[in-house]
Amino acid sequence: MGRDLPVLEPTLVLQGKGYREVLKREMDAGKIPLSLGKKCPVECDFCYELDHSYRETQDPPKTSQDDWEFILNYINAKPTDPMQFWCLGGNEYMEWTDLFLHPKGMEWVEDFLKHTDKNIQFFTVGFVHVPKIHQLVAQYPGRINFELSVITLSKYREKLMPHAPSVRHVMKVLDGPAVSSANFYSFDQDTMSKDAEQIAKVNQQCVLWMGCLTPVRGLKEDTANLMRQGRKFLPLEAERIYDAGYPNLTTIHTEAYVTAFLNRKRIVSAFDALELEKKDTVVMAGSVHKILNMYRKGRARFLHIPNAMLGGDSDCTVLLTFDDIRKCLTNEKRLHIPKSVMESGRGTNMDIMGVTLEEFIHKTGVKVKVLHKIDTKFANTRLYRNGTLKNFVEDYVRNPAAASYEALPLSA
Ligand code: SF4
């Protein structure tokens, strides 16, 4: 049972800020902040933005030509980093929508390529103009990273994304040079594996980015159950794709417990490098907790923090909030907290809700030692390195040690 501590309040950063200032904040974080001026009309059942009440967002108007010129000039004035891809979508302070539904979306992508020397990346369920998108990729080689959210080509498509482009259209988008990576998921037998087969038939260059979707709070129960069903079939589906040996690069790393297991050596060595003492309390999400209990039991006090704010089946240290941690406190006087918890896009030392480290310390009275080496870069770069399909099949699906890991209860 947790201590009775006051609820932590996020620092509101948008209050009193004008629309243009919000645009600047997005652009300073590498975003190209277009807006549809309304909720996403695609209304996918699995959309993680359905309940985004955990963070402060602004309801921006539909981007006008004037706004676009402001955006283009602001970005143009920034120095060009050849490794940087400016992101169309994924706004932090504005709700996510499929930005290619903006009537000027395609035209402005072309503007961006023509009038800046910068790279662009975007995510869409496929609302692009064919053949324009293929032409742009051919005309501006290396400057476009197009991540196509196929999600599924199976019979579940109609249920999960009734307003998305047709399979026929998606296949046309895939048939050409445009798509850099296509993401799609396991929901049942013959879903992910059949999608891989169809996609590889028309496009051997794009990365096949696979896995299963994780239910978070706010999703309908039957959608969450379909995602969980997909998780059960993931090993079988992955083996089929692996054995088929398509020429495409393949990645599979959407499930936290799998990612943690595949990176167990790295997690353990990062823990050892921290040189913690047995009495030290270190916070972490479920999967990392399991790994450390398997390989380093008793070497420190591992405090398992469920991702209560994101809810559903989420299990990720990067997405923990200070309030999640507060709920788990009993008699701790001092905590070790990974830096990744406070590196969100909200601001310095803030979690994804916008609660600061200072607020946490002030309201709980707990002293905090920040584990600077366990940062988002470590989580994203290091831990994703082992995310190939080959690695998943050989080191997880066909590895007897993974079965005993799966059998361990979460808070063992
Ligand atoms: S298209 Fe993207 S943003 Fe729109 S509802 Fe679907 S998942 Fe959400």
Image (tube, rainbow, N blue to C red):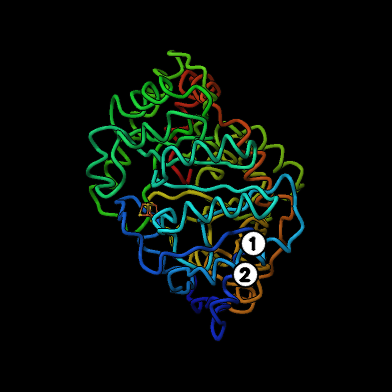
Q: Secondary structure at mark 2?
A: helix
Q: Is residue 202 left or right of residue 368?
A: left
Q: Nearer the viewer, residue 362 or 351?
A: 351
Q: Which residue is mark 1?
A: 29
**Residue at left 67%, top 67%?**
74
Label at residue 321: none
The quarter of the rendered structure image containing the N terminus is bottom left
Q: Secondary structure at mark 1?
A: loop
Q: Is 159 drawn above or below residue 393 in the view shown?
A: below
Q: Which residue is mark 2?
A: 25
Dot 1 alpha-carbon crowd within 10 angstroms: few under 14, some 14 to 19, many 20 or more: some
Q: Is 257 drawn above or below residue 371 in the view shown?
A: above
| Residue 308 horizontal/vertical position (percent) | 43, 60
Mark 2 vs ligand 1: CB below 8 Å: no
Q: CA distance from mark 1 to mark 2?
A: 7 Å
Residue 157 visible in the snapshot:
yes
| Residue 36 horizontal/vertical position (percent) | 41, 64
Asked where in the image residue 16 lies, by quadrant, the reply is: bottom right
Q: Is residue 117 left or right of residue 67?
A: right
**Residue at left 49%, top 32%?**
252
* Amino acid beneath label 1: Ala
Do the numbered discs 1 and 2 sit on residues whose CB atoms are within 8 Å?
yes
